[in-house]
Image (cartoon, coloured by chain):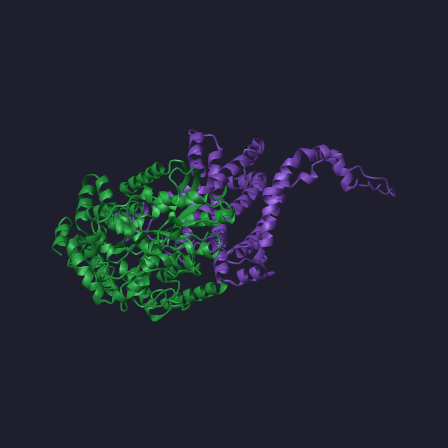
Chain colours: A green, B purple
């Protein structure tokens, strides 16, 4: 514990407080049982344990992957992924560059044609490309999407064993997300959970304890209202845009916490057959966001058209008090503060110093967070434009999902999908450099994977956000909006 | 002049001789060179227009399985059409489409015609002003939609900042995140983008009004309104009809502005047919349903197209060959 404390001294004092509070709190709130959904045992994966194993092993990626595909293999690879965008910090771009350089050095004779696509564009493009037999050989997809392609029969049966890894090296929840009808259709690249971020300065200004985040979702509503009333600033960064991944990642934890869900994905033994989007817990969660948006007007009015990117500017400008996001948000804020000038710079620096991370609030039933991440998949040879070079695909998947690069590539954005990544030196460096990584990591046991169903994307990206919009715009009352969503989910489930 | 074009009257009791029209094949053979010239164009059109239309109609009668495997497709007759016509979202989108199309067309035409009338006379800076008014038309629709999205932004929009700064409103005006204002906001942007087109068309029409007639009407003491209504308007009527029809077609197909600015939201308040079809096809992967929807839209477009062609060819049949 002493060692742990010594290392923690490098971190901000507030972060330490959050970290020390977090672990016992999780146990006390029954998060232990929730760990079974992701297979992550909270008793083991404490911030202390994560720190204790970091940097204890070294890996030679080239040697490991060379056993799967010789490093002098000559071939070609086509690859699509949601990569770094202009909105992301410089370090993301640097890591991306380093990754491609390292791959080219290890496999100099594999010619790569790659496409970095925007999250909002990639799904439709990939669906169309696969239908038109113009799919890439390999695609890295957000955790929610892969099962749809697997159910359509467009992916090749391909798992960790095909690239020399065992399934035990990945989180069980992540392996579940690449499994369809007991067959494996991908390899997890990275997994993460989000946290609650708040601006301690605004809390203070609003008369709240700057070091005490809201403990429950009811507190979030109350804090948001108080902040708006006392400061005129928006309290909580609600996101309710349709067809944008940010919406379910922020709203589903609230729904689950209150005992709701789209289906029964948050229950201990999910069957994905029970529709829960209109149960009392779901309605209560929906009512909470309606209270914030309509009654209290304590969240951005533009929540219906915003993505999380549009919450970043008001946050760094000191105009937004709370939001839910990745560990990467701290780096984003540092990046933005570095680019600001004059008065803006002063404000941005104040915000960065007042930035705090805490656990996502709990509800009446549980504390929950989306078990997020990405998986890499290989498309069926007849759907790939120009044919599939299986060895090139294997070499790439092995290289990118190994302990070294699954840690390094997601430097600030996520955590390694390959659990051995936690033992790398890179992980140790990350823990020393990235503030609040321990807080977001300690949310992992509370992670709930999205339903592993081909209908999941439509449920999470269209039906649930539409339900929110129907209620938030006053188009229909909360119970009616929830019932309509339940009807739509039922129809969708019957169609497949 | 008119008498020269009139048919020669026949003597009483003489029956007009029936001229036998040559058969279709004979006529094609006679004009074989003409047909050969257009054959490549017809081939391309068959490939890129006729085949997709056929395929869309075919798809509209099918229920495709989730894997979209055509060999497992189920023929469902008019089931997709029935589903669409019964769906509440269709009625909502239809109403939105009518509002979007009618208001966008009407306002863009009136503004464009007004601008054309104002710019028709000779005055200093006329060319410059015409150029400036054309700017919205030449800007990329995607770029314009993004800029307007930020201008209208409900929290940090320029308009909201100005109204709050001037004390006109306590909070920024909610343009895009309210079901009651979103459509009007989108129409405003669409009109801004389209009215230069109407202006150019009508300006071209105004150039054809004979100067002598206008001078004669002035000499006869006709008021400005009478000169417009009895001299100008009859000359530009056909151009106006063509312009309105083109605007109607463009607006029915107007995808970029609503999709980029709101994606059809909030709560479907700005969902029009074309964005709804896109959402069904590519957001929800229901190609059969989306195809049936497209066929309905296609039929409506064909009706408009018929009137457009009629308006374009009006008078052609009276032209002596």
Residue drawn at x 40%, y 36% as measured from the top left: A109
Judge by depth and name the residue closer to the eye, A190 or B19.
Answer: A190
Is residue A86 in view? no
- How many marks the image carries: the answer is 0
Residue drawn at x 54%, y 61% as measured from the top left: B85
Q: Quadrant of residue B292?
A: bottom right
Q: Position of residue A14 (x, y in %)?
A: 15, 54
Is residue A396 in view? yes
Q: Is B204 drawn above or below residue A348 in the view shown?
A: above
Identify the residue at the far bottom of this view.
A280
Q: Position of residue A434 (x, y in %)?
A: 21, 48
Judge by depth and name the residue closer to the eye, A80 or A256.
Answer: A80
The quarter in which the N terminus of chain A is drawn is bottom left
Q: Position of residue B136 (x, y in %)?
A: 43, 39
Q: Is B229 drawn above or below residue B102 in the view shown?
A: above
Identify the residue at the far front of this view.
A67
Q: Quadrant of residue A176?
A: bottom left
| In the displayed structure image, the side of residue A474 where residue B304 appears, left or right | right
| In the displayed structure image, the side of residue A485 where residue B206 appears, left or right | right
Judge by depth and name the residue closer to the eye, A236 or A495.
Answer: A495
Q: Position of residue A131 (x, y in %)?
A: 51, 49
Identify the residue at the far top of this view.
B124
């Amino acid at each position: 514990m002493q060692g742990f404390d010594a290392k923690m001294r490098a971190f901000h004092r507030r972060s330490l407080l959050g970290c020390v509070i977090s672990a016992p709190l999780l146990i006390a709130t029954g998060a232990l049982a929730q760990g079974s959904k992701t297979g992550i045992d909270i008793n083991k994966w404490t911030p202390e344990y994560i720190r204790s194993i970091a940097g204890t092993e070294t890996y030679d990626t080239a040697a490991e992957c060379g056993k799967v595909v010789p490093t002098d293999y000559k071939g070609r690879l086509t690859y699509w992924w949601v990569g770094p965008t202009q909105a992301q910090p410089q370090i993301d771009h640097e890591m991306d560059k380093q990754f491609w350089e390292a791959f080219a050095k290890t496999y100099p004779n594999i010619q790569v044609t790659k496409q970095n696509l925007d999250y909002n564009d990639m799904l439709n493009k990939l669906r169309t490309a696969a239908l038109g037999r113009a799919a890439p050989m390999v695609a890295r997809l957000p955790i929610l999407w892969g099962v749809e392609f697997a159910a359509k029969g467009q992916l090749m049966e391909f798992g960790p064993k095909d690239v020399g890894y065992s399934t035990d090296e990945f989180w069980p929840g992540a392996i579940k997300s690449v499994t369809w009808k007991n067959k494996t259709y991908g390899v997890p690249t990275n997994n993460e959970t989000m946290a609650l971020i708040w601006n301690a300065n605004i809390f203070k200004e609003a008369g709240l304890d700057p070091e005490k985040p809201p403990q429950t979702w009811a507190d979030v509503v109350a804090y948001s209202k108080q902040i708006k009333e006392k400061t005129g600033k928006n309290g909580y960064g609600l996101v309710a845009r349709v067809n944008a991944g940010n919406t379910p990642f922020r709203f589903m934890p609230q729904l689950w916490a209150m005992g709701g869900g789209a289906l029964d994905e948050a229950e201990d033994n999910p069957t994905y057959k029970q529709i829960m989007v209109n149960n009392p817990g779901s309605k209560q969660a929906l009512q909470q966001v309606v209270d914030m948006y309509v009654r209290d007007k304590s969240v951005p009015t533009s929540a219906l058209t915003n993505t999380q990117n549009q919450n970043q500017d008001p946050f760094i400008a000191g105009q937004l008090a709370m939001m839910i996001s990745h560990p990467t948000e701290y780096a984003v804020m540092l990046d933005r503060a570095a680019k600001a000038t004059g008065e803006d710079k002063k404000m941005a620096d104040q915000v960065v110093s007042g930035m705090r991370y805490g656990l996502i609030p709990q509800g009446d039933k549980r504390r929950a967070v989306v078990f997020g991440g990405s998986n890499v998949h290989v498309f069926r040879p007849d759907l790939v434009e120009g044919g599939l070079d299986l060895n090139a695909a294997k070499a790439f998947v092995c290289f990118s999902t190994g302990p070294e690069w699954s840690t390094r590539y997601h430097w600030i954005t996520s955590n390694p999908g390959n659990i051995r990544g936690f033992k790398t030196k890179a992980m140790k460096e990350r823990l020393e450099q990235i503030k609040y990584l321990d807080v977001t990591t300690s949310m992992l046991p509370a992670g709930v994977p999205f339903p592993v169903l081909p209908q999941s994307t439509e449920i999470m990206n269209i039906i649930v956000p539409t339900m929110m919009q129907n209620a938030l715009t006053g188009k229909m009352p909360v119970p009616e909006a929830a019932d309509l969503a339940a009807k739509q989910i039922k129809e969708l489930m019957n169609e497949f | 002049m008119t008498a020269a074009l009139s048919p020669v009257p026949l003597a009483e009791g003489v029956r007009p001789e029936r001229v036998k029209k040559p058969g279709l094949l004979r006529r094609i053979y006679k004009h074989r060179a003409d047909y050969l010239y257009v054959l490549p164009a017809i081939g391309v059109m068959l490939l890129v227009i006729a085949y997709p239309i056929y395929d869309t109609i075919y798809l509209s009668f099918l229920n495709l399985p989730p894997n979209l495997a055509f060999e497992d497709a189920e023929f469902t007759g008019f089931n997709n059409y029935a589903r669409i016509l019964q769906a509440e979202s269709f009625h909502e989108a239809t109403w939105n489409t009518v509002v979007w199309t009618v208001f966008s067309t009407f306002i863009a035409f009136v503004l464009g015609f007004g601008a054309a009338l104002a710019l028709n006379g000779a005055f200093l800076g006329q060319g410059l002003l015409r150029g400036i008014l054309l700017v919205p038309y030449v800007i990329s629709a995607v770029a314009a939609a993004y800029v307007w999205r930020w201008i209208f932004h409900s929290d940090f929009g320029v308009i909201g900042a100005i109204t709050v700064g001037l004390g006109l409103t306590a909070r920024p005006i909610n343009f895009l995140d309210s079901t009651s204002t979103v459509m009007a906001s989108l129409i405003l942007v669409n009109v801004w983008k389209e009215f230069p087109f109407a202006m150019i068309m009508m300006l071209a029409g105004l150039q054809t009004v004979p100067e002598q007639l206008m001078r004669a009407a002035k000499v006869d003491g006709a008021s400005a309104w009478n000169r417009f209504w009895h001299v100008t308007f009859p000359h530009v009527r056909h151009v106006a009809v063509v312009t309105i029809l083109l605007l109607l077609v463009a607006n029915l197909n107007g995808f970029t502005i609503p999709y980029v600015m709101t994606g059809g939201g909030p709560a479907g308040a700005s969902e029009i047919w074309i964005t709804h079809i896109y959402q069904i096809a590519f957001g929800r992967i229901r190609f059969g349903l989306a195809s049936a929807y497209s066929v309905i839209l296609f039929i409506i477009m064909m009706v408009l197209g018929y009137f457009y062609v009629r308006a374009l060819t009006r008078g052609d049949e009276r032209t002596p060959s």
